[in-house]
Image (tube, rainbow, N blue to C red):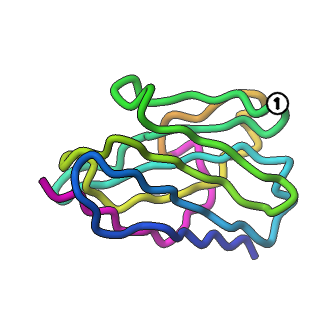
Amino acid sequence: QVQLVESGGGLVQAGSSLRLSCAASGLTFSNYGMGWFRQAPGKERAFVAAIRWNDGRTKYEDSLKGRFTISRDNAKNTVYLQMNSLKPEDTAVYYCAVQSRRLQYGLGYFHYEYDYWGQGTQVTVSS
């Protein structure tokens, strides 16, 4: 059974940094692309970043490029999201997800391209 456990969220001030972690189990982690999404109150779940399984290639939501960095450590079965210069509009529940193998070498952008999801971790940025 695939399990994803996010951690690292919290309440921070604008301009701060946070690093989210997502520990995966129940799958051969190095064979799967991974992604991060977020959902703000009253809004749809939105793509944040993705990282490919084979070469670590990444993709970001355009508005987040330069502030957020996704990375992975296959030895630890963990994917990370480094978030810098946080803004109040970054407040959301952040979810990690396992990309569907049917994408093969693609980088998923839509939620339906991911098969497994964590429970989420809350990030709140105060002004």
Q: Is residue 64 left or right of residue 60?
A: left
With respect to residue 76, does 25 lie above or below? below
- Asked if the stretch drawn in magenta spans residue 121, the answer is yes
- For mark 1, give the secondary structure: loop
Residue closest to the far top = 62
**Magenta stretch, overall SS:** strand
Range drawn in magenta:
112-127
* Residue at point 87%, 58% (across, down): 75
Q: For this rendering, which residue is in front, 1 or 55?
A: 55
* Residue type highlighted by circle 1: Asp
The residue located at (58%, 55%) in the rendering is 97
Q: Residue at x 61, y 53 (%)?
A: 80
- Of all residues, the one furthest to the left in this rendering is 127
Q: Is residue 83 above or below residue 4?
A: above
Q: Quadrant of residue 61?
A: top left
Vertical side of 21 occupied by 105: above or below:
above
1 left or right, relative to 90:
right
The answer to if 80 sits in the magenta stretch is no
- The location of residue 14, given as percent across then percent down, is 22, 50
Q: Is residue 65 above or below residue 46?
A: above
Disc 1 packing (10 Å; few <14; some 14–19; many ≥20): few
**Coordinates of residue 52 in the picture (x, y in percent):** 72, 35
Tell me where residue 48 appears, x and y as whole percent: 44, 40
Which residue is label 1 attached to?
55
